[in-house]
Image: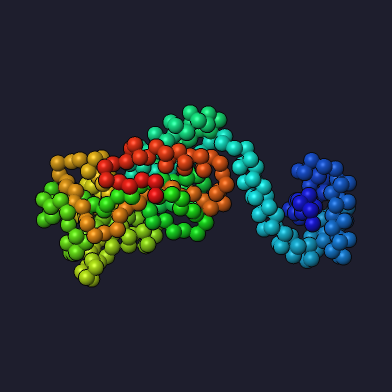
Amino acid sequence: MERTEMEAFLTLSEELHFGRTAERLHVTTGLISKTIKKIERRVGAPLFERSSRHVALTPLGRALRDDLLPLYEGIKLAMDRAQLAGRGVSGSLTVGFMGTQAGRILHAAREVFERRHPDCRVRIVETRLEQHVTQLRDGVADVLLTVLPVDEPGLTVGAVVTRGARYMCLSAGHRLAERDVATFEDLAGETFVSVAASVPDYWNDFHTPRQTPSGQLIGRHAEPCATYAEALALAAAGRAIVPGDGQLLLLYPRPDIRFVRIADMPPLEHGLVWRTRDACDQRIRAFSATVLEITPALAVRGTQVGL
């Protein structure tokens, strides 16, 4: 069945009126009638019951509609993506960021990107802790520069933009506060900050593990934090410890908190994430390349970039 035939059949199955179907498709009523009869001859049975006042799907017509609709929608989506890719870098792009360093990188990348691609505007929005990847799911953002890991169906993790050693933010009076380096095992008995239940377990378990390598317990605070500022306030009050990377030392200096590197915990990574179906979008490809290009000049000391 050709796409125009599918479109005529599915539109008529929705409208159940030849005149309205023809109007929606900008063709004549006669052409719709001719197309439906052609499909019925091919099928070998009526798809619609017709009278002067009534049009209804037959049981066979309903079955065909249910089978064709997801196929048609898939074809339409594929065509839309192809047309978007064919137009090149134009239109608009919304990019989300999690963390101050990611925000600095994206704003610098936008300046370079928009000079190179004046027909495409970039909007930058913050990704809060509890949102995780919902901005991509909801269509609020096209790309995220966010804290990894991200392991979600329908989403693609592109390049790792930065990778840095793991640090913990502690109160100035904490037992580890005067140390430059500690170990994972030193965190036994501590309490991590917690985030909203909307954040998946695999992300929480990576950033705020519940036990040390030897099996000693680490707690999580009972009150989830929505922002990093809330988390740092808990750390300053001595109620929890906050994970992060080397940007903490540069971007969050405060007299009431200290930063200690945890030598044997896996590094913390920020990466670009987008919807898998948008992999051919030239805007996303071009912006991602720009991010990787400008990041080395902005990354904090000791951070690996463009991995």
Q: How is the image coloured?
A: rainbow
Q: Is residue 122 left or right of residue 226?
A: right
**Split into 4 quadrants, where in the image is the N terminus?**
bottom right
Q: State whether residue 55 appears in this view.
A: yes
Q: Based on the displayed image, in which of its 4 quarters is residue 26 positioned?
A: top right
Residue at image position (77%, 44%) is 25
Query: Horizontal and vertical percent for residue 231?
Result: 26, 49
In the picture, measured across the screen, residue 177 lies left or right of residue 140, that is left
Question: Residue at 23% across / 66% down in the picture?
Answer: 212
- Of residues 194 and 144, the one nearer the viewer is 144
Quarter where residue 294 is shown? top left
Position of residue 215 measured from the top left corner of the image (x, y, whole percent): 23, 71
Q: Is residue 57 left or right of residue 187?
A: right
Farthest bottom residue in view: 215
Q: How many marks?
A: 0
Q: Give how far across and how far down residue 33 sits, in percent.
A: 87, 51
Residue that appears at 52% across and 56% down? 154
Q: List x then y, in percent, for residue 281.
A: 56, 44
Q: Judge whether 55 appears above or below 117 on screen.
A: below
Depth check: 207 or 140 in front? 207
Q: What residue is drawn where x is 55% and y is 30%?
A: 119
Q: Is residue 226 visible?
A: no
